[in-house]
Amino acid sequence: MPKVLDGAVIASEIKQEVAEEVRRLASKNVRPGLAAVLVGHVPASQIYVKSKVQACADLGLYSDLVRPAETVTTEEMLALIATLNAREDVDGILVQLPLPKQVDAKVLLDAIAPEKDVDGFHPVNAGRLQAGRPALAPCTPAGVIEILKRSGIAIAGANAVVVGRSDIVGKPAAMLLLHENATVTICHSKTRDLGAVTRQADILVAAIGRPGFVTPRMVKPGATVIDVGINRIDNREEFDRFFKGNEKREAAFAKRGAVIVGDVHPAAFEVSGAYTPVPGGVGLLTIAMLMANTVRAAKMRRGL
Ligand code: NDP
């Protein structure tokens, strides 16, 4: 039976450590603070930001939810970022994406002070990460590494294959694995004979954005499979392709009219030695790593 790498258990471990660190910092009169900027009313964004603000409260961090009007311009957002960059009580700035069409997200993210860029998206942090210097790494890939390490999966010397090369997941995940001494291959939509490459993987990271894309024959038996994908399935045919006969999923589908599936076909997990489930895997680490990054940013900025 493959081992399930439980994201909830690992996330809760990390959150406990963050809360302890926050308590230690309090004795030095430091309270790490996160400014969360939410524009508009995208339901998923509202839920994410609410969870982030709640996590701050749970762990003892200060948070400030900033809600500019939906009609905000790039210039107004830049002025807001400049204010947050200058604020002493703000260690981390998080701009929830997506932003409304009229706002240039790239210009905005580049305007966040790199030392407060707790999402790790700023080119300076990407460069520092690549150069192996202290950096704020993107939360989801950082979570992938935490799952592997805390589950006792050997990374050094392993063949790690990352499918996906986005700036927020694939590339930084590959870079972090490289720093942990894995032999890393990055695959993408132009990769030839993808299955032949993924079958070499001792650690396979799927960050593709396509439901159930990784099939059993793409996985080396016994490999560790990390499924970063989050895809919503709301049509019956597609549901059956992944979950036919799965009572728990049937019940969830009947209740909500949709279920979440990763980038790995559930049958492919059965071939693995260990895997992160979806939901309940990598996704749960993202907020924990955001909290960890905020505390790290607070310490780095003060030279602690
Ligand atoms: P992007 O769309 O930015 O990148 C997808 C990558 O997959 C691209 O590099 C693309 O290649 C590659 N790809 C697409 N089709 C294929 C194919 N047929 N064969 C091989 N490679 C392919 O997605 P993200 O990186 O932002 O996200 C990936 C997944 O992770 C999504 O499901 C997303 O929802 C999820 N996610 C989960 C998070 C979490 O908290 N757990 C956080 C962020 C994302 P190319 O570059 O050639 O186009």
Image: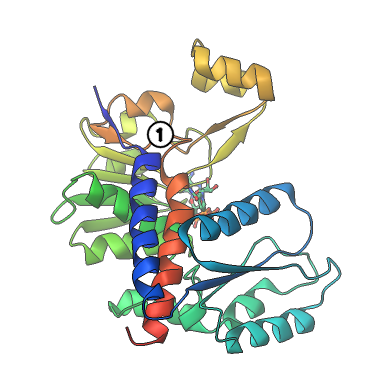
Please state if 151 lies on the left or on the right of 126 as rendered: left
Q: Quadrant of residue 202?
A: top left
For the point 48% across and 65% down, the residue is 167
Residue pushed farthest front?
27
Q: Which residue is tagged 1?
A: 277
Question: On screen, 53 above or below 74?
Answer: above
Please state if 80 lies on the left or on the right of 139 as rendered: right
Quadrant of the drawing holding the C terminus? bottom left
Please state if 159 lies on the left or on the right of 286 as rendered: left
Quadrant of the drawing holding the N terminus? top left
Question: On screen, 198 above or below 169?
Answer: above
Give how far across and how far down residue 295 sits, in percent. Answer: 42, 70
Question: On screen, 267 above or below 35?
Answer: above
Residue pushed farthest right?
71
Give how far across and how far down residue 178 sits, in percent. Answer: 24, 63
For the point 20% across and 32% down, the residue is 222
Residue 235: tell me if it is visible.
Answer: no
Give how far across and how far down residue 249 sits, in percent. Answer: 54, 19
Amino acid type at image mark 1: Pro
- Seen from the viewer's position, the closer of residues 276 and 198 is 276
Question: On screen, 90 above or below 217?
Answer: below
Give how far across and how far down residue 238 sits, in percent. Answer: 60, 23
